[in-house]
Amino acid sequence: MLTIREYARPQTMDEAMTLLKSNKKSQVLGGGMLMLKLGDKTIDLAVDLVDLGLDYIKPIENAVEIGAMATFHSIETDPYLKNCFSGMWTDAMKYIVGVQFRNLATLGATAYSKYAFSDPNTALLALDAELVMYGDRRMAFDEFLAKRKRRFDILEKIVIKNPETTKAAFDSIRRSKGDFAVLNAAASVCDGKYRISVGIRPRVAKLATGAMAYLNENGLTAETAKTAAKMAADELDFATNLRASGEYRKAVAPALIERVLLKLL
Amino acid sequence: MKVIGKSYDKKDGIRLAMGAPAYTEDLYDTKSYLTVKLLRSPHPFARIVSIDTSAALALEGVVAVYTHNDVPKTQYTRAGQNFPEPSNYDKRMLDEYVRYVGDEVAIIAAETERIAEEAMKLIKVEYEVFEPVVDAEKAIGHPSVIHPEGVVEKIPSGVDVENNIAATYVLAYGNLEEAFSKCTHVVEHKYYTQAQAHVMMETHRSNAHLDHNDRLVVTTSTQVPFHARRILAHALDLPVSKIRVIKPRIGGGFGGKQALHTEFYTAFVTLKTGRPSMLTYTRKEAFESTYTRHPMVFTYKVGADDAGIIRAIKVNGISDTGAYGEHARTVFSAACLKVLSMYNKMEAFDFEGNVVYTNRTPGGALRGYGTTQGVFAIESAINELAHEMAMDPCRIRELNHTAEGETHLVYRAFGSDGIKKPLKLIENNKMSTCIEHGKKLIGWDEKYGKTIVNGNKARGVGMALSMQGSGIPSIDMGAAIIKLNEDGSFNLMMGATDLGTGSDTVLAQIAAEVLSVPLEKISVHSSDTDVTPFDVGAYASSTTYITGTAVINAAEDIRSQILNEGAAMLEEAPEQCEYDGERVFCGEKSINLADLAMKLLYVKNQKQLVGHGSHVTEKSPPPFLAGFAEVEVDLDTGEFEIIDYVAAVDGGAILNPKLALIQMEGGLVQGMGMAVFEDVKFIDGKLKTNSLLEYKIPTRSDVPKITVDFVESYEPSGPFGGKSVGEVCINTPSPAIADAIFNATGVRIRKLPVTPEKIILGKMGHDV
Amino acid sequence: MNITLTVNGKKRTAEISPDDFLLETLRSLGFKSVKRGCDTGSCGLCTVLVEGKPVLSCSYLSARADGHEVTTIEGAGEEAKKVASALVGEGVEQCGFCSPGLVLSILGMKKELGSGATDDQIKNYLNGNLCRCTGYEGQLRGIRQYLEV
């Protein structure tokens, strides 16, 4: 059951931060309304970011800025983004419930909440992305995933570098197309630098740094893809949840990662 | 035929699609009705030592909180079945014992849902926790006895509460040992089916109020209004005459509403408080606290001789009915009767098993009703036997299936367990044609026996047969009343329950055909125990077959009255007159129907014409179906797609082809859900897959190309030749897909659902 | 708190709790076509249009809807009737519980994808609209009928 005592709709980021700090049991409302209902939560003050104009997707020099309130659906249909990153964002969002869900879920909330069950998080980790918090505080996404969050913070936007020159790919293993994936993986290459991320292990997405270093040194071919995929599967840990066993994840990870790498060729 | 055989739109189609407020939760006054909520047990097996409701009662807006001390101690069964019910009376409204996680502990009635939810948190319960029985295969002889106070058995079914046995079923014929000795090929394996959930889109709900005649009126989303009335009377110790049950439009059932769930609580609250009340189950409650398909384990031993004739079958089964035994014995017996009877060349068979109580969510009726579980086991066993003999699975079916005009040992053995005898001969049976058509449509001969591999992808085909019944013989009864209105239109009143299937429309088609009038002339009113005549309700694929004939009887009754009255108006003898749907005429003289109707109400020989009819029969002519699946599997990850599914069905004559097609497609996809997507996980007795986030029914991207072929057939005992299709369609996907997977990968999966993980782990040598 | 939102073209005010979701508020305002099918945002039955876009009303806070435009099927006009008729024509309005949400989603889909949407695109767009009665095939036939007119 969700209880919210007070609701506020600030008109500027500063106003939002002031409101947030004014109450110990306050919470930011981004795209995360979906997950809120699932718990038994009491929020004293809900600070809704909906009027802050953060739903943009803006190309800038050598990068693209995705506002914290940009929805999955706006991202997967954006005319600019569809031609960037080899169109990976369409694949990464395709099987998430349905459009009425994707018109509410935001990349900002998903990334900020570090959801382990997420496809977009795995995709984002495979790109050169940084989160920009209130006060222009910037942190690379992989660093953000590893560090503890601040108590009062507001995500403003996500900045991803080299959208037009980065080749990227995403794939997943899922049972029903309406379900969370059992395992997912994403990879990218830009200027000969490779990134491989694997998620829903079932823990949150992680970079396979050893496999990445191998590819950086040897380049990508059908053979090195196979080797790199095996390396990535070996260096990461897998466990069991309701959807699949760790044994299965470990057994099929090489095939999935190889599939993703081959898409980059 | 003017109306039968035509694909009319459902009468309620357009208004429901446009959102008409016609469902239970739309039909009450949210401001004056109390909201009812139920506090539920967090333990799989416990006794309530104490329960303190004072803090909850003190909350403003809470009107009442009831515990097991406040409700009648009567035991009943929730199962919607004919009286006397063959299910144990083992359930109380509230009990000192809680027998599964989700069992009811207290009833809260409050002014709003929010207040009721707050009140729930304030109830303090002290439990004495017992060790739960969580494994059906370990239930018998477990130190925990789930029903220590005993249960009431209306029909002897072998209950043995000390051993947690809810029912026993044994049916045998012939000398099994001798029959097996003649077999050159024998396979023996164990098969598991899971506790599939109905996931009807509208969860269970009801509301209750006392009307101006001080009678209890319960409006409920149910498949069984008349059984509901009787069972409520019993549970509340009220005469049946004081209760009215109404079923409005409902959002699906699939057997989940062939029982009472919420009705006890709204009825009780309304009776005690004098105020109307509403209870809507959440999706979580629908998963955890209603019932599921009975999960079963079957050990099948099947033997055939060199010619491929199956001479002997031995079956041991365990059905898990969970905490309560709704539909326990009848579902289990269907897994024998409607399954073994598909094959009649055997000399001996033995089917035995127990339905056991466990401390898990109860099992109950779900489309297919035991036949589904039995078909998975027998068809898988026969597919394995065929493989063992290097014989085409279609061929072994062709050699062994019960053919038209034949009987089966099962029917001879049936009488030996003391229950009424069903039909002896299967008179109308197009199974051979179903197999023939299905093979052609999927391309069986081109595809079977070859594992087609393309890179890391492999394809395979598999098949399975199924039959079901059409109503329960000598037990299911339906009735209809038809009255004539002044404009020559008719009101058709039936107890029969339209769950969304369109039975209101199909039954109206039958009436229209018999009365020779267009469909628009028939207005339907159904499922109101005060206004409509009796009907057992929507289950056992009975509505078209049983109620359809009742409608024919009622229509013929009023048709002859129209002729007689028309003749009287024309001052001629009825034998000299004719009625053609538009008028009654004799030579040059005629009176048209509307005119006659008007005169009969207002002008001359005034009377209300009413036709009535009932129907019950010894017959239950089975529908037959042959299902074929083609799959493509990624051998590296186990991911697979069902790329084609063909079902050729003999449902008798099809009265509304469009609606019958949707029944078939819907049932096939529900069967695919059970086969592939719907995984059930219990951990320590708690159902973990208790939301749509965890329990996945097929989405539209999961559905393959489906081809349905209605084989031409005519059942003489059915309305205009009809039988049924409603349940038979759900049974074949599990075994057909499992065998297709085997043919593509070499991995044999015997525990449902079939998953990519099981394919990979199976290849690694695990038991799946 | 009080909110004012436009529903089907008319301004409506409602007294809500900050934790009320649009589904409850719309039903309490009398729009019974909006249905609850689950607790987890998984089924799509509660779909309404907010500024023309399909969203899950069960997961959209009413407080956020303050000042916005909502369309339910009661106000979706002739176009909704065309979609509904196409579905009814294929027999796939069965229990009817998934229909209003599906019809609105189809309207959103036509606006975005146009009449030339492929089967795969249709299935993907509507994947969040569950149905247990029909097996979806007939719904696709009905949608094709609607788009082809």
Image: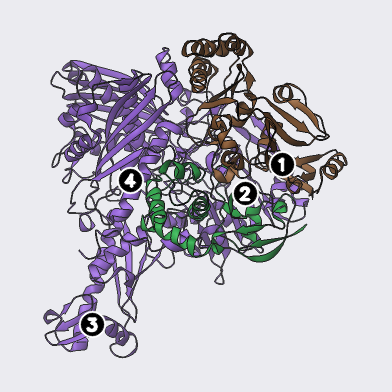
> Which of the two marks, 1 or 4, is nearer to us in this view?
1
- State the mark number for residue B671: none
The tint of chain C in the picture is green
Residue B546 as seen in the image, left or right of residue C67: left
Q: Do badges 3 and 2 share one subunit?
A: no
Quadrant housing the N terminus of chain C: bottom right
Front-most of B606 and B243? B606
Q: Amino acid at mark 1?
A: Gly
Q: CA distance from mark 3 to mark 4?
A: 43 Å
Give the distance between the C-alpha atoms of the residues marked 1 and 3, in whole angstroms: 73 Å
Q: Which residue bears the numbered disc 1?
A: A30
Which amino acid, mark 2? Cys
Amino acid residing under circle 3: Glu
Q: x, y (%) of residue A196?
A: 59, 19
Q: Say which colour chain A has.
A: brown
Mark 3 or 2, closer to the camera: 2
Say which amino acid is labelled 4: Met
Is A87 displayed left or right of C28 in the figure? left
- Observer-side mark, 1 or 2, equals 1
Would residue B601 be found to the left or right of residue B139 on screen? left
Q: What residue does disc 2 label?
A: C58
How many other residues sit within 10 Å of disc 4, few (<14), some (14-19) or many (≥20)?
Answer: many
Is mark 1 in CB contact (under 8 Å) with mark 4?
no
Q: Which residue is mark 3?
A: B565
